[in-house]
Amino acid sequence: MSLLVDIRKTYGAFTLNVRFETEDNAPAVLGLLGASGCGKSLTLKCIAGVETPDEGRIVLDGVTLFDSHKKIDLPPQKRQVGYLFQNYALFPNMTVRQNILCGLCRETDKARREQEVRRVLALLQLEGLEHRRPHQLSGGQQQRVALARILVNRPRLLLLDEPFSALDSHLRDKLQMELRGLLADFGHDVLLVTHSRDEAYHLCRRVAVLERGRLLAVKATKALFADPGSVAAATLTGCKNIAPAHKTGEYEVEVPDWGIRLQTAQPVGDGVKAVGIRAHYFNTKTAQNRYPVAYLGEMEEPFEWIVEFRYEGQRPGTPPIWWRIPKDRRPQTFPPALGAAPVNVLLLYE
């Protein structure tokens, strides 16, 4: 199973320019992670055939879906691509069963149609809901009906565009667990568009980071979180503390806004632009990269404290630094200094 996407498309002042491939050793979920307006959904629409790139190629399992040079542009119904829209796009006047049958509009064998409907009803735990209409379903049930309508046609690629955006947080977490199991059994590649680092981490084997129409990185998910490589990727993966920096040694950077120098575990490249330290990485006992700090305030969360502080030599007007502490590890008094291990200093190059 493999997908190659290498396309360009211009919309007014916005230009999409992306190239990536899925791994062909095993089906997997590739996340497209980025802020709103970065081109994630436009990329999906080009793959599905809803939008047409200005130039480039899209190849799925050796079949060319689009090639501007060869003038190939398969219509959406011939691409064997299933596309789940953000709002699910269910027909409100149809029952669950009728909505699912819409995915089999070109299947003329009645026995085959019935077999496939039963299969996806069981797969997505929708049995007993066949005669309900969308307004009679919960948000999670609506999502499963929309997926059933796609899967009934056995697509070779599944595109999910912000599939949890319409759900509340409790249902979102529950359905992520359900969807992870479903996608593992799907047997084909999946592209998941999201702006949520949690969704990307929970569901995706690899993540592609997009910013303003450009692809910044494609990495294994855990590798991306450990070493995002750019300011945009660090921000999208949840790093709260980012500041400009420049190289002062093979394993050292200076951070003028914070008034400190940091030792790094990785060699510092000449093009380093900034550093990041995740809020969980500060430690009262770490001796390395340890500097005096001043307490500013704190905010309680259900299971953690967020503490704001400044370095002693930090420039006035620069943002405070966040330190996240599990409630059972919160010190009785604020420490006079904090450290961060060199391995936890993120080097950012864009």
Image (cartoon, rainbow, N blue to C red):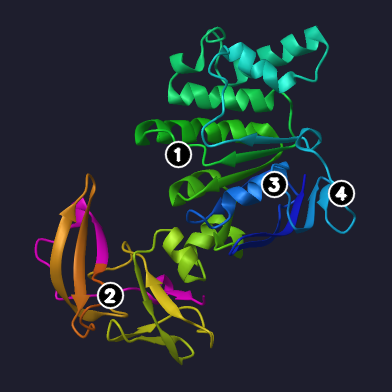
* Distance between mark 3 and mark 4 Cα atoms: 14 Å
Which comes before the other along the chain, label 4 or label 1? 4
Say how many tags the image has: 4
Q: Nearer the viewer, mark 1 or mark 3?
A: 3
Q: Nearer the viewer, mark 4 or mark 1?
A: 4
Q: Which residue is mark 1?
A: 165
Q: Secondary structure at mark 3?
A: loop
Residue 91 drawn at (x, y percent): 57, 20
Does residue 239 appear in the picture of this structure? yes
Q: Secondary structure at mark 4?
A: strand
Segment tinted magenta in the rendering: 322-350
Q: How many neighbours does mark 1 have within 10 angstroms: few (below 14), some (14-19), or many (20 or more)?
A: some
Q: Residue at x 87, y 59 (%)?
A: 69
321 w.r.t. 53: above or below = below
| Disc on res. 51 | 3
| Disc on res. 72 | 4
Q: How many neighbours does mark 4 have within 10 angstroms: few (below 14), some (14-19), or many (20 or more)?
A: few
Q: How many neighbours does mark 2 have within 10 angstroms: few (below 14), some (14-19), or many (20 or more)?
A: some
Does residue 205 appear in the picture of this structure? no
Q: Which residue is mark 2?
A: 339
211 w.r.t. 288: above or below = above
Three-letter amino acid code at the position of disc 4: Ile
Residue 241 drawn at (x, y percent): 33, 69
Q: Nearer the viewer, mark 4 or mark 2?
A: 4
